[in-house]
Amino acid sequence: MPEVTLSLPAVLGLLAIFLGVGAALVYFALRQTAGPALSPTDTPTLTLTVTPSLTPTPLTPTPTDTPAASPTPFTYTVQENDSCLSIAFSFDISVNSLVLLNNLPADCSTLIIGQKLLVPQPTPTSTPPATATLSAGEATEAACEKYEYEVKEGDTLGSISLNFNVPSDAIREYNGLVNDVVRFGQKLVIPLCRRNATPGPTPTATLPPPYPAVPLLLPPDGAPFTLIDEVITLQWASVGTLRENEAYGVTIEDLTEGQGRKLIEYVTDTRFIVPETFRPNDNIPHIFRWWVFAVRQMGTDSDGNPIWETAGAVSTPRVFTWVGILAIVSPTP
C-alpha cells in the first residue's frame, strides 16, 4: 500500500476544517428544529384617570331691606285746655315724640289755642302669637289678680292680711312661707282673688288694692328754670281711672331753703302748676324736689276738710332748679 505522509501543520489544518464543518451542521440543524424565536409581547396596562367635574354652588341671594314708608304726620289744631299730655294720650303717642317733632320746650308751656301741631302716626302694635290652651287650674291661676307688696316697718302677716282682706293662709301659700314671720323690705305676692267674702245680704265693698308708683313725665329730672319762667308745670302719667274719693297728692319741697319750705296739694288732673308764690325771693338758684302718689279720702275733719291717706306707691322723686327774682342793688354814691 502506498504510504501517505502528512506534516503536523497540515494535520492541524484538516482538523480545524473538520471541526468548523461539524459546528456549522449542528447550527443549521438546531435552527430547523426550534423554529422562529418568539419575542415577548408587552401587555399595556390601562390607567383610567378620572377628572372631577366641579358642581357649581348656587349663590344665596343677599336679602335687601326695603325700607317701609314712614307714615306721614298729620296736623292738629290746639283746642282750649289742651296739653301735650292730653294730645299724646288722645292719639296714642308719646309726649316725647310730639315735643321733638314740633321743636317744643320740654314742659310744653308754649301751647296756644289755634296752634298747628304735627302729630306722628301711632306705632302699630304687633299681635302676640297665639299661646297654648291652659288647663282649668292654670287658667284659674292666670286669671287671679295679684299685687306685689313690700313689707313696711311694723308690718305683720296679720296686719297685711287685714289690710288686703286676704287670708293669712293664702299669703303663706303663694309666698312659700313656713310661718307667720315677715321681714322688713321683704317682697310678698298678695293674691287678691282670694279675698274673704263679706258676709251678710248687703256686703260692704272692700278697699281696692294700692295703686302702682306714679310715672313722672315733665319736667325732666334736673331741669333748670330761669327768671323768665314765671310758673312751672309738673306732669305725670295716669295710674288708671280714679274713683270719686281719690286724687293725686303732689309734694314739692325747697331743699335750698334753710327752713325747708314744703307745698302739698291734692288734684284729680295729671298735671299741677307750681304757683308763683312758691318761687324763690332771692337771686340764688334753689333746688326743688317733687313727687306724686295716689291718695284716698277717708273722711273729713271738724272744719270740713278732707282727710287723705296714701292709696299707692310713691313715685321716684325728681328735682329741678329755679332762680328767683333779681336783687336790686342801689348804686354807690
Image (tube, rainbow, N blue to C red):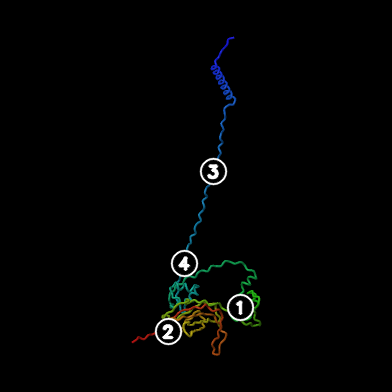
Precedes in sequence: disc 1 or disc 2:
1
Q: Which residue is mark 1?
A: 183
Precedes in sequence: disc 3 or disc 1:
3
Give the number of the mark in front: 2 or 4. 2
Residue 101 sits in quarter: bottom left
Q: Where is residue 177 drawn, in percent x and y?
A: 64, 75
Residue occupying image coordinates x 54% and y 87%: 305
The amino acid beneath tag 4 is: Ser
Residue 332 sits in quarter: bottom left
Give the number of the mark in front: 4 or 3. 3
Precedes in sequence: disc 2 or disc 4:
4
Above or below — where is 236 with respect to 66?
below
What kind of element bears circle 3? loop
**How far apart, in angstroms, are the residues tagged by discs 1 and 2?**
47 Å
Q: Nearer the viewer, residue 230 or 245?
A: 230
Q: Where is residue 68 drawn, in percent x and y?
A: 48, 64
The single residue placed furthest to the bottom in the displayed view is 302
- Tell whether 269 sits left or right of 133: left
The amino acid beneath tag 2 is: Asp
In the rendered image, which quarter contains the C terminus?
bottom left
Give the number of the mark in front: 3 or 1. 1
The single residue placed furthest to the left in the displayed view is 333
Q: Which residue is mark 2?
A: 282
The amino acid beneath tag 1 is: Arg
The amino acid beneath tag 3 is: Thr
- Tell whether 254 sits left or right of 164: left
Q: Which residue is mark 3?
A: 49
Question: Is residue 113 visible to us here?
Answer: no
**How far apart, in angstroms, are the residues tagged by discs 1 and 4?**
53 Å
Looking at the rendered structure, which numbered label has been put on residue 227?
A: none
Q: Which residue is mark 4?
A: 70
Give the number of the mark in front: 1 or 4. 1
